[in-house]
Image: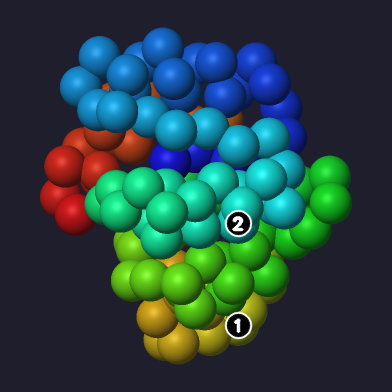
Amino acid sequence: MVCDDEIDLLEMFQLILGTEYEVLTADSGKCCIEKYFEEKKVKDKKIDILLLDYRLGDMYGDAVAKKVKELNDVKIIIVSAYELEQEMVEGLKQSGYIVDIIKKPVSMKSLIEKIENF
């Protein structure tokens, strides 16, 4: 699953990752939480990885990660163009909310390698 408020990035992730994986997309934090809940609880589908933008139009990625983690154990990778506080990132990792962080612009080759390692 990919959550980003930039539609062109969602389309790029869908196009590139969709050749190997089933990719769900969400364009806001609220949509991400709702879609994740629907896929997991209603449709009983397994979502392995969530690529989650940090600065969404309606929420921050850490709030979305915490809410999604309440619903299930999914590996969450924060994707951000912004420099995030290292202490916050380490806290999210230690608490089990995220497994990694990737800086934008994203190298699709390194992203695919990272996904394959999880």
Q: Quadrant of the C terminus?
A: bottom left
How much space separates mark 1 and mark 2, taking CA atoms? 25 Å
Secondary element under disc 2, as helix, strand or loop, is helix
Binning the other alpha carbons within 10 Å of mark 2 as few (below 14), some (14 to 19) or many (20 upward) gives some
Binning the other alpha carbons within 10 Å of mark 1 as few (below 14), some (14 to 19) or many (20 upward) gives few
Residue behind mark 2? 33
Q: In the figure, is residue 116 to the left or right of 28?
A: left
Q: Quadrant of the N terminus?
A: top left
Front residue of 117/31: it is 31
Q: Position of residue 90 (x, y in %)?
A: 50, 80
- Residue located 57% across and 24% down the image: 10
Q: In the figure, is residue 69 to the left or right of 33?
A: left
Residue behind mark 1? 87
Mark nearer the N terminus (1 vs 2): 2
Residue 112 lies in what quarter of the image? top left
- Residue located 59% across and 72% down the image: 67
Give the amino acid at mark 2. Ile
Give the amino acid at mark 1. Glu
Q: Position of residue 39 (x, y in %)?
A: 42, 48
Count of numbered circles in the view: 2
Q: Residue furthest front?
A: 42
Residue 40 lies in what quarter of the image? bottom left
Q: Position of residue 93 (x, y in %)?
A: 43, 77
